[in-house]
Image (cartoon, rainbow, N blue to C red):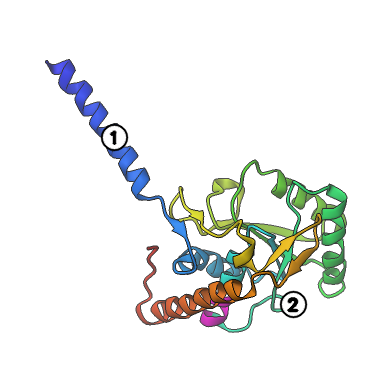
């Protein structure tokens, strides 16, 4: 009888863990992306990077939310161009194409700052190959003068400097929907904009409204929740 009870309790605990995991699964939308972006915003405020690159296309929404939330909380974005720059530098495109994009940014940056700090923002890590290659390219192009930091919307563990992840099973509802982003790619790295413009504007307007509301909550209550 005791073995039966022990086995039952073990199964009950296992089921409880599964239920807890499932209950933590959340879809990241314009309504809650601010709470995911907040730790990234605080990291940028602390580190003051000279340049921020968001990996297109997955990090476009978190990049926009991060820039908007920083503005609401702290004012002007602290980079040399006060912007988040979107670049398609994933491991899926040829290294030479990724290098060409980064080269233009880094050479311009080095003329302003001899030892720039570059922050790379992405949505999530699959294998870590994009981060590894990007770091190697930036170090090579800058002759080791640039400091590279990495941030993620989701997960990453010790592979990144900061993550906005609150729930390990979170995923983005619109990450691969071109209509909401407002552009699509018909080549390796050239985005074509203004598709389904009405849907894109509506989506981003909703996100910016929620960013403003979240920022007011931070300022008045100094309390963050991920709901």
- Give the CA separation, mark 1 to mark 2: 51 Å
The residue at the point 72 percent across, 58 percent down is 148
| Percent coordinates x, y for residue 42 in the rendering | 53, 69
Q: Secondary structure at mark 1?
A: helix
- What residue is pinned by disc 2? 80
Q: Residues within 10 Å of mark 2 (few under 14, many from 20)?
A: some
- Is 172 above or below relative to 85? above
- The spot of residue 59 in percent (x, y) is 63, 60
Measuring from the top left, give residue 114's x and y in whole percent. 83, 69
Q: Is residue 63 visible?
A: yes
Nearest the camera: 159 or 169? 169
**What span is colored magenta in the figure?**
67-73
Residue 181 occupies quadrant = bottom right
Mark 1, residues whose alpha carbon is within 10 Å: few (<14), some, or many (≥20)? few
Point 61% across, 47% down: residue: 125
Residue at x 20% of width, y 28% of height: 9
Q: Is residue 70 magenta?
A: yes
Residue at the (13%, 17%) spot, across then down: 2
Specify which label sits upstream in the sequence, 1 or 2.
Answer: 1
Q: Which mark is residue 15?
A: 1
Please identify the dominant SS of the magenta region: helix
Left or right relative to 53: residue 24: left
């Amino acid at each position: 009888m005791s073995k039966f009870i022990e086995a039952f309790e073990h199964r009950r605990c296992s089921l409880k863990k599964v239920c807890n995991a499932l209950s933590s699964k959340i879809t990241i939308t314009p309504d809650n992306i601010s709470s995911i972006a907040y730790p990234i915003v605080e990291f940028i405020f602390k580190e003051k990077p000279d340049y921020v690159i968001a990996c297109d296309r997955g990090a476009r929404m978190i990049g926009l939310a991060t820039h908007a939330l920083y503005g609401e909380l702290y004012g002007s974005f602290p980079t040399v161009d006060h912007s988040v720059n979107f670049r398609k530098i994933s491991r899926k495109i040829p290294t030479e194409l990724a290098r060409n994009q980064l080269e233009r940014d880094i050479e311009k940056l080095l003329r302003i700052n001899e030892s720039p700090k570059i922050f790379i923002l992405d949505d999530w890590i699959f294998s870590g190959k994009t981060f590894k290659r990007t770091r190697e390219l930036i170090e090579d192009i800058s002759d080791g003068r640039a400091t590279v930091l990495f941030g993620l919307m989701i997960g990453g563990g010790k592979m990144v400097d900061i993550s906005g992840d609150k729930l390990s099973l979170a995923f983005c509802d619109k990450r691969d929907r071109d209509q909401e982003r407002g552009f699509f790619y018909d080549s390796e790295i050239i985005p074509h904009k203004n598709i389904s413009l009405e849907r894109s504007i509506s989506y981003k307007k909703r996100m910016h409204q929620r960013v403003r509301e979240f920022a007011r909550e931070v300022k008045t209550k100094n309390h963050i929740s991920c709901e």
